[in-house]
Image: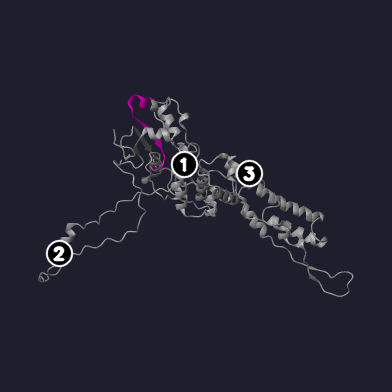
Amino acid sequence: MNPPSHVINLDGEVIIVLLNADSLFTEPSEDMITHRFPHNLPELNDTIQNTAKDMKRPEDYIETPKTIFGGKRKGKKKKGGYKNVRAPLEPISPPTEEPAIAEEYAIAEAPAIAEAPAIAEEPAIAEEPPAEEPIEQPFETNLVFESANRGYFRIQVSAKHLMLASSVFRKILTGSWKESITFLEKGSVEITAESWDIEALLILLRAIHGQQYQIPRKLTLEMLAKVTVLADYYECKEAVYIWTTTWIDALGEELPKTYCRDLFLWLWISWFFQLPAQFKDSTSTIMSLSNDWISNLGLPVSDKVTEAMNNCREEAIDNLIRRLHQTRRDLLDGSRGCGFECSSIMYGALTKEMQLNNLLSPRPTPPFPSLSYKCLVQKVLSFKSPQWYSRPSSYSSYGSSHHHICLHSSFPFLFGTLNEFIRGLDLHNLNG
């Protein structure tokens, strides 16, 4: 039997066999690529792993030879996700030596030269290697045996700690599956996992075993998302919950203001740790900037969260389009405008602007593909209000025409105050 590559507990009875480590995690959606590359250029995302959304739980397994957690994502692969594949380095060929006959020929042709007195050569001074750029120090994992296959790891852990912290591991080791029977008969067992990030898994296992001094105080946003996905999947949130403030404060970064993958990582982290302010901000930005149906990118965010975001986005866009068409009807029937000329001119200007911005015919309908709420508001705010001159009053024989000014001759007044961002979701309401 191969020795463990990582030892969390030296007396541990369980070996977690991690296969296909460090696989893809949370691929960006097509509309994210459109936001970043308007000309449909592919985006290379970070090398990451699959998430637990599409992975089976222990209760889904019946009489299988090995319980595999993680698994590869089933179904058709989403478009727009690109693997960051590192091309293998090609060996550099040594310089080709010239044939010996050519060397002899060169010596024979060279004129004879008197030998110069030998000069003592100075000792060669060793060249200092170029200074390397600092790199991030890797997380120490107490490596005991390193397998030739970087996607394969064996981790020795304690069964008691697993069962106390995780209901999922407790079911595996005490249920009616093959692993639990083997554990009861032999006192040890191997449990297979797949597609997790090795560093994230080690952080979680050390938290489960109470090895707080070996857990890093600062994680990247992506690593924090990976650790929390694992904690959610194995149902051991309490093991990492005490690190909430430390990890969140150490991030030291504001939520993204663009529609990107990191924004969804923040959405998941704020949902997992129940952070109301970050949750409201992330949902507001997602709903305002998305130009398509909002998904969870494979993260285990509750379906009611994505459903609420899609409903709010569609409602906000639909309400603004309704306001435009209602204002146009009011100008047509004369209920808006200070007079015939005013309502007629404003009706014509509004109709032209709506047609130029594809808001008139055909009228946009839910789910409003290729249209974000913020983009729609910016279009409306860019509508140009017409300017014209009114004739002097009929009872005055003197006077000249003057620039027409009234409240109804301005689009900002007709539409009212428009905010570019939709109000974010309330975390407590969703939990309730």
Task: Indicate the amino acid at tag 2.
Answer: Ile
Task: Indicate the amino acid at tag 3.
Answer: Asn
Between the C-alphas of marks 2 and 3, the distance is: 87 Å
Q: Closer to the N terminus: mark 3 or mark 1?
A: 1
Q: On the image, numbered disc 3 is attached to which residue?
A: 311
Would residue 303 be seen by someone viewing this image from the given angle? yes
Between the C-alphas of marks 2 and 1, the distance is: 72 Å
Task: Indicate the amino acid at tag 1.
Answer: Val
Q: Nearer the viewer, mark 2 or mark 1?
A: 1
Magenta residue span? 181-198
Q: On the image, numbered disc 1 is attached to which residue?
A: 229
Q: Residue at x 83, y 60 (%)?
A: 340
State the image coordinates of residue 399 (x, y, percent, origin top left). Answer: 84, 74
Q: On the image, numbered disc 2 is attached to which residue?
A: 107
State the image coordinates of residue 269 (x, y, percent, origin top left). Answer: 50, 46
Q: Closer to the N terminus: mark 2 or mark 3?
A: 2
